[in-house]
Amino acid sequence: MREIEQLEADDSDLPTVLIGSDYRLLACNRAYRENAVKSVEIGRSRCFEITHGYTSPCHENGEACPLQRVAETGLAQRVLHVHHTRNGARYCDITMEPVYATDGRLLGYRETLQGVDHASHEPRADTLCGQSAPFRAMLELINRVAPTDVSVLLQGESGTGKELVARAIHDASERRDQPFVVVECTGLNESLFESELFGYSKGAFTGANRDKPGLVDAAHGGTLFLDEIGDIPLQQQVKLLRLLETGTYRAVGSVETRRANFRLVSASHKNLPQLVEAGEFRQDLYFRLAAFPIHLPALRERIGDLPLLCDLFVRQQSPDKRLTPAALAKLSGYDFPGNVRELRNLLQRACLMADDERIEPGHLPPLAAQAEPAAAATGDEEIVSLKEAERRYLQRVSRQFAGSTAELASRLGISERTLYRKLADTTGR
Ligand SMILES: Nc1ncnc2c1ncn2[C@@H]1O[C@H](COP(=O)(O)OP(=O)(O)OP(=O)(O)O)[C@@H](O)[C@H]1O
């Protein structure tokens, strides 16, 4: 029972708890008690009651239960959950492992809860916001890699949040108090590339009338974020590779070799493996950059996050305004080639166009519809449930209709309240 005494006496800030096979708490530290919204009763309280407010285990509520997995496999597990804490509901990175007595008997399961500050499942400024499965899968990868020094490659379409993710990785790393330096690689020609990245010494070229440190110097101790890395021409790729392989560099016009100290995060909207295949990107450099690749889902792949993101951007622009369900339905049928950035810009404009607190479909610009399955033209009409047909129809008409929700409801022969409810179902995918 030394484990129990040790845990009760543990004064660290990481909430930690020992849980029995029946989900009851056997011991916990001070941080766990202070973090909990309910009072913790050792021997009585069950883990899912304290952290989720559930009355039954997480797996019966649609969430992965780490205890169940550890019991099955005997191996440590790490999962991402949303927990109720004193600071509200927040993402929590959970690690669970079995704990054995010296005689080999299973004592219970030790769970540590690491709060995630860089992401939120509610609208919160300056964090990565999302709830959908593709978003959570991305967040799990971010949380795993952030505390290490491994090079990360972010791949995703323009506007998917690559710079935001790069910052999140920096903020969640040991280097968070050191600089985060962004290098926009597009448009850096050969001489600019070297002098920007490595700096130059006085007299290196005409106009160099003083020593100038480069971005690698500026990032010393911190994170260097190379954005649009796919745009670097082959000659510069060699120089970057040399920097990464030797960990050293020389300022232009200098003979002094300097040692670099940065964590590398790079990003590209281009498909780098395809560029490698086409001979436009060096394979050896690609392998160095992509030690840990992370795919950032396009907004259309995580359309379930649309209501949350709309809420975030409308609140930021005009805290008193709200998007009507009809306007949300119009947005949800759109493809968003410009992703989250396009959504943010579109809502900024809509906030300016709406005179009262309701943002209606007419306040949004015309949006090209997503391609519908071309069935009718071939005569092979797809058979779907009437509910699904209604969903598709409502999405289509709310996209096309430029008037208010009240006018649309009247044209459809239903009350405005019924239309609101149906449209909310339509977007709650
Ligand atoms: N998950 C998210 N939660 C909140 N805001 C987001 C999220 N993803 C992106 N954004 C916002 O969308 C905008 C675009 O993000 P960002 O500049 O990071 O994208 P990017 O992928 O780096 O774009 P580009 O490839 O064009 O440089 C920013 O305002 C950013 O704050």
Image: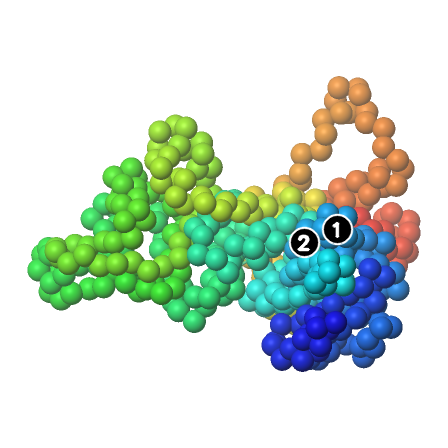
Mark 2 highlights which residue?
77
Label 1 packing within 10 angstroms: few (<14), some (14-19), many (20+): some
Q: Is residue 102 above or below residue 28?
A: above
- Choose between 252 and 220: the one closer to the eye: 220
Question: What amino acid type should be assigned to the residue bearing mark 1?
Answer: Arg
Picture residue at 82% right of the left edge, 60% below the top: 21
The mark nearer the N terminus, 1 or 2, is 1
Residue contact between numbered discs 1 and 2, judged by CB atoms under 8 Å: yes
Percent position of residue 175, x then y = 43, 66
* Residue 175 visible to the viewer: yes
Q: Is residue 157 above or below residue 347?
A: above
Picture residue at 72% right of the left edge, 26% below the top: 374
Is 27 left, or right, of 198 in this rendering? Answer: right
Mark 1 highlights which residue?
69
Q: Quadrant of residue 255?
A: bottom left
Percent position of residue 65, x then y = 77, 55
Q: Is residue 205 above or below residue 389?
A: below
Question: What amino acid type should be assigned to the residue bearing mark 2?
Answer: Gln
Picture residue at 70% right of the left edge, 44% below the top: 333
